[in-house]
Image: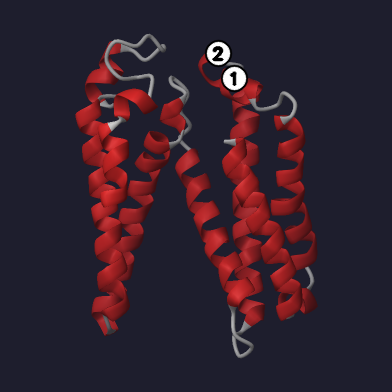
Amino acid sequence: LLLVLPGCIATSVLFSWTPGSFDGVTHSMRLIYFNIPAYVIRSLVALTGWSVLAFALPSAEGNTARLMAGLGLLFHGIAITFVAQDWVLAAEPPFISTSFGASVAFTQLLAALGLAAALGRRDWKFQDLGALMLVVTLGITYTDFMAGLVMWCGDLPSKIFWLAERIQQPWRALAVAIFILTSLIPVVLLMFARVRASRIALRFIAACSLTGLALYQAWL
């Protein structure tokens, strides 16, 4: 929570939608969503909820743990939808994407699974871990591809400018590298059961995925 305070204090410096700017954000959107008090409240609510779950869930047991996990998953789905817009896409208004929250959630899952594969003990069931990595990789690939396709086909100035900036060099080459590292290599290799069960193979795939995700954050 303390780490986010500088961002909340410096909102007028970090974002162009703050009062006095001209960035295509309508007056009604400023009143309802793009204003500093609403941004700070959304950020603090999300971080407080995540902090409570991080401390309370590991010590919970039985039905209490299952209830907290279910409610926590619901809370995370809602929170990440708003936080992804506020902390990333809000830097370039008026662009918004309703699927971006799901994309960020997939990247979180893939990063967590990649770290588990890279640091996992020998007695872990790596085949299950590999299967989860395959599902999440397919999820983020589909979500991002469809979002890009819809934006490109829609050809709306308020959306296409964001994508057009990121297909110029050197960002185009970076996007190709991200696709190869995060989607192509993992999907092809994880299709094989022997690969999913191999600790060494999963470590290699995890290294590719984590490197691709790091480049993806730079691309954004």
* Most distant residue in the bottom direction: 123
Q: For mark 2, does the 10 Å Cα neighbourhood hold few (<14), some (14 to 19), or many (20 or more) residues?
A: few
* 160 is higher (above) or lower (below) than 46: above
Image quadrant holding the C terminus, namely top right
- Picture quadrant where residue 196 is located: bottom right
Type of colouring: secondary structure
Number of marks present in the image shown:
2
Whether residue 69 sits left or right of residue 37 in the image: it is right
Residue at mark 1: 160
Q: Which mark is residue 110?
A: none
Q: Kindly indicate whether the residue at mark 1 contacts the one at mark 2 (C-beta within 8 angstroms).
A: yes
Q: In this image, 3 relative to 104: left or right? A: left
182 and 32: which is toward the camera: 182
Under circle 2, the secondary element is helix
The residue lying at 67 percent from left, 57 percent from top is 209
Task: State how far apart marks 2 and 1 are (Cα).
Answer: 5 Å
Query: Dot 1, crowdedness within 10 Å: few (<14), some or many (≥20)?
Result: some
Describe the element under mark 1 as helix, strand or loop: helix
What residue appears at the point 63 percent right and 22 percent down from the top-left corner?
165
Identify the image quadrant of residue 10.
Answer: top left
Foreground residue among 211 and 150: 211
Q: Which residue is pictured at 73% across the width and 60% down the height?
A: 186
198 to the left or right of 152: right
Name the amino acid type tagged 1: Ile
